[in-house]
Every structure is written in C-alpha cells, then in structure tokens.
Amino acid sequence: MVRTTVVGNYPRVGDTFEEQSLRRAIARFDKGEISAAELGDAEREVVKVVLREQNEGGIDLVTDGQISWYDSQSHIARRLASVEINGLARYFDTNTYYRQPVVHGAIAWKEPILVDEWKFAQANSKAPVKAVLTGPLTLASLALDKHYRKKKPLALDAANALGEEVSGLVRAGATHIQIDEPILTRHPEDLPLAVEGLERIRTRKGAAALTLFTYFGEVSKIFEELVETPADAIGLDLVQGAATWSAIAKHGSKKPLVLGLVDARNTKREDPAEVAKKVLSLKDRIDLKASFLSPSNGLEFLPRERAREKLRIVSAAARKVGVAS
Amino acid sequence: MTGLLTTSVGSFPKPEYLLRARTKASKGELSEEGLRALEEKATAEWIHFQEEIGIDIPVDGEQYRGDMATYFAENIDGTEISGLVRSYGNRYYKKPIIVDELRRKGPISVDWFKFAQARTKRPLKGMITGPYTMMDWSFDEFYGSREEACLAFAKLLHQEALSLEAAGAKIVQVDEPALSTRFDELPLLVKAVGTVTKGLRAKTILHTCYGNYNEIFEFFNKLPVDQLDLEMSNSGLDLLDRFKREPLKKEIAFGVVDVHSHVIEPESLIRERIEKALTIFEPEKLYIDPDCGLKTRSVEEAQAKLRNMVAAARAVREAHRLT
C-alpha cells in the first residue's frame, strides 16, 4: 500500500480549443479586453478541471496545479514586502523562464499569498489539497539581492514570511504543506540554511503535515541529513535524481518519503509494474503505508494529455504495490 | 585592413501578413503552397532590407520557421511533435519527441538557403539548430541516453552541413542556445558540435545566448568552430575584462543590441560598445551583430536596431580607417 500525490504545477493548457480557455483569457486581459476579476474566473474554471483530472487520475493528495502562478518564484515573491519583479531568467536546466524577484529591502510578509487560492481549490476537491510553497532557500538563491548582500539573512527573512503564510493556510484548514527546495540539488552545501529556514516554518504549521521536496537532481550526498530535517516527510526526484536511490536503499528512512519515480520531464510512458517493483524493493527500508508515490516534479513540462497519462501511471503503479504488499 | 563586418544572428520578425497566414494555415484555411508563397515574399523582403542598409553577411531571416528545434525535427525521421508545453508566462510551444532512430529525410534548410542566396551576392549564412540544443529541447522515448540522442542528431546535422556547403554556403552557423544548460555536459556539446563541423571547408560559427558565460568561459577556446557569436550587450559587456586576461583564439561576433528590449539603442551607444570591443579584439576578427535573433521584436523595431547597428559599425570603421 502506498498513497499517490503530485508535486505541484500542472499544464494549464491542452491541445483542444476548450483546453486553451486560459490562454485566450490571458491574451484578452493583456489587451485590456477583460478585467482582472474575469481573468480570475477563467483561472478558477481551469483549477476545477485540473482537480477533476487529478481525481480521475486516482491521485489521493492533490494540488491546485498552480494555475494562476506566472512562475515558481514571482508568484510568491511579488506579494512580499521590498520585492520587485524583474526580467526573465532561465529556470534551472529547464527550457523555461521565471521573472526574477529583485530584493530592495528587508523581506517581510505583508498580505495573504496563497490562502484564497487554496480555499477555492479545497472547496472544489474531494481529496485533500496540498498547499505548495517555494522554499526560502530557493527563493533567496534565485532572486537578485540588492539589499542583504548575503544569502543567509535573506533566506531567513523569507522563511519568517513564508511561516506567516503557512500559519494562514493552516488556519484556513490546510492539512498538508509542502516546501519546495530544488536548489538543494545544485547546492547541497546549503542544507544547514535550508534546515534553519524550515525550522522557522515548522513552528507555524500547527498539526499540518510538512513535506520538504527537492527535484531536478539528486541529493545522495546529503540524504542522511535530509531525512533528519524538521519536516514530516521528504519528497525526492528519483528520475533526474536517480542517484539518490542507492542512498535510500542503503540508509532507509524513518520518515515517510514521497517517491518521485514517474518522469515528469519526458513523455515516455513508464510501465506501472516496473514502477511498482521499484517501490516494493524499499518495503523493508521505509514505511510504505505512510509514504507517497508521485511524478518526479511538477507536470507542467509535459503536454496536457501526457500529464494525464502520467497521473494514471502513478495510480496504476500504486495499486500494484497495494496488491503485492 | 578590413574589419567590423556586420551580420545577424538568424531570425527576424515575421510581418503581419505572414503571421495571419500562419494562423490560417494552422486551421487548414490556407494551403501549404499559399503559405510558402508568403514565406518567400517575406524572405525576399528581408534580403532586400539587408542589402539596402548594407549588412555584410546577411541571413535568410527564418520566416519559414516556427520554433527552431521543432522546424528541424519536422524534417527528421524518428520524431513526432508534442502537444503544447509552456515556455513562460502565456507562451507555449511544441517540442520534438524522439520515437525512433533519428535519420535525415533529406536536406532540411538547404532550399531556403538557395532561395535567399539567389537574391544576394553577399555570402549568406547557412543555419543549423545544433545537436545539443535539439537533444535538450526534445522529449526522448527512444535512446534513453542524452549522449546517444545528442550524437545521433550530430551525425545527421553533419550531413545537413555538407549539403549546405554543396549548395554554396561559405559560412555555416550552429545555433546552441541550450549550451549553458548543464555545465557537466559541455564536453558532450564540444564532441557533438565537432561531429557537425568535421571536415567542413566553410567558415563555422557557434551561436549561443542567455548564458552564464563566466561558468563556461574556459570552454570557449575548445569549441570546434572558427567563430563564436555571443550575446554581449545584454550581459552588460562585463565579459570583456575576462577576454582581456584570457584571449579568445577565434573570431568573435559581438552582440551590440539587446533583442529583448523595445528600446532602440542610439547609434552613439552602439559606437561606444564597438569601440570597447576594439580594445580587446582585432578588427578583422571582430564581427558586429545583435545579441540574438530579432524575431520577438516588431518589424519596425528590428529594422531600426539593425539600421543603427550598421551605421555605428560604418562610423567606427571610418574613424579607424578600416575599409
């Protein structure tokens, strides 16, 4: 038995006319033909569809697909004090771009960022909706810092601000919080700072389950420390980060893991039986019942129809694990 | 002594009539021939414009391409084209999917090279989307190894380079915008580009952009091409100091106008940039061009930027008595 989840983002458009409603709405908004409120309506309609697709795909713990996010960094950063949003920068090794946050002064929480989006998604989902936040270390690393001149105070102020947001999400009813720190796959030496930031978020999360997720690479060298961090579960990209696998097999984990075994960056369809076999090989090393199976990162890098298939592969593999265990 | 020859990176914006025609064609409301005729018209117009302002080494302007990787993939066996994926914001594109062994169906860009070269006496660049970028921007359902997929692209793109040379290309440019994606794969990129350029008599160029150049600097002299084409103005010209300390053993095409900005750089600013470049590079090894393809600008913006660029290069040439 293993449960299923997704990592965060989901394709906002597909290849049919109906599936491109948001693309058209944004274009009309940019031309001044519709209001921000109407654009918000168009986004929420897509969120409903994305929740339905995850539901039909057999996902136990879903997200809102981050449909209203311009990108992983600026959606959060633009609502923090002392941050402006600048030009495009390449996002890790993906052929996608994010608007780079520029930090001009002390970062602080000033208004709710994700709470309304989360409430709407949860009101439209039978499955629990996980709230996903870009981690303070990743935010600090990808921003252009013109104030602190040092990563540590920037990351820790960001952590305090994100902690405030997490507190609001939990008050609104969120039971699952995920903090994404993909930068750890590039800078594992920054783990102590990630931990310090996470500790500040942990104190604000109440009874919610807190997951720390890394993707776009492996974390084998810091795996032992990673599973000791102040999170309730650890999410791992085991496709691009396949090298982490041997560390799990060797050390095991007392904490539940989110096993990102289905490739969210390639269209190739995995055989659910093969995926299930891999999961089952860990049954003596981790608590499978408390763990999740997931794609390796957000599904937005795939065409919509292939993202739907990947959801089905995740849930088919999880069912096979259930039958065998 | 000659020097400061002007050129372009590759793409130019498509005129309104061509954009409308492409939309119609995608809905099946315009035939392939109908679209082709308008692509030819736009290409001829861009060649004429480059002649008129006096660009030394013209390009065909890529009026017939949507995405640079997808266009090549559409003409390679063993690929399919994916559904839409997001690039950023509200921009989406279709990616190649490798589903079988990659093979060249036949010449890919040679017809367009011939069409454009027939309209100018100046040497036109042959343009190839590089093997590393083709691999990095494709989904792979066949090879299961980035290296294998990359080298398979390299092999068939070498055939394309030979075809361009046979069609009369004196210059072949390999575009590798994905070059700085993964630093640990730079040796693979060097190997793959070397496979494409091996044995060519034509002058070879490697273009890249959006790069963290400081991280890849030490690879510049290892790249198996005669000329590097770099985005310089968008990176604030801060690489120049490093070139002073660690000289480039190749020609350089030096980007002097920002392709991401609506601002039309005045001639005086471009002259300053060229003068700065001249303090580091020999004029005969220094080419002047925009940072990258101009396709995201409007036709008017692109033309204004190119006009100022050519005028600035001419003024600097005169000031330094270069012919």
Image (cartoon, coloured by chain):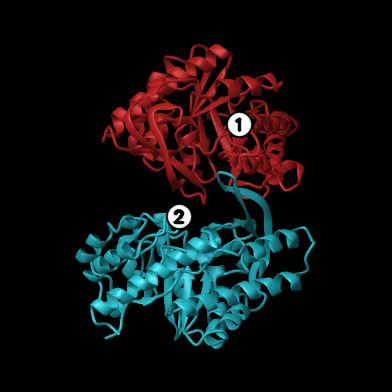
Chain colours: A red, B cyan
Above-or-below relation of B110 to A215: below
Does the CB distance between marks 1 and 2 fall below 8 Å?
Answer: no
Q: Could you say where residue B113 lies in the image, as x and y percent from the top left?
A: 57, 80
Q: Residues within 10 Å of mark 1 (few under 14, many from 20)?
A: few
Residue at horizontal 55 percent and vertical 43 percent from the top:
B89
Q: Is residue A129 left or right of residue B316?
A: right
Q: Residues within 10 Å of mark 2 (few under 14, many from 20)?
A: some
**For discs 1 and 2, the disc positioned in front in the rendered view:** 1
Residue at horizontal 47 percent and vertical 59 percent from the top:
B178
The disc at residue B15 is: none
The residue that label 1 is drawn on is A36
Amino acid bearing label 1? Ala
Q: Could you say where residue B94 lies in the image, as x and y percent from the top left?
A: 64, 55
Q: Is residue B26 left or right of residue B235?
A: right
**Quarter location, residue B37:** bottom right
* Quadrant occupied by the C terminus of chain A: top right
The disc at residue B260 is: 2
In depth, the one of A4 and B222 nearer the eye is B222
Marked residue chain, label 2: B
Q: Is residue A145 left or right of residue A36?
A: left
Question: Disc 2 on helix, strand or loop?
Answer: loop
Q: CA distance from mark 1 to mark 2?
A: 26 Å
In depth, the one of A92 and B92 nearer the eye is B92
In depth, the one of A201 and A18 nearer the eye is A18
Q: Could you say where residue A245 lies in the image, as x and y percent from the top left?
A: 50, 40
* Quadrant occupied by the N terminus of chain A: top right
Question: Disc 1 on helix, strand or loop?
Answer: helix
Amino acid bearing label 2? His
Marked residue chain, label 1: A
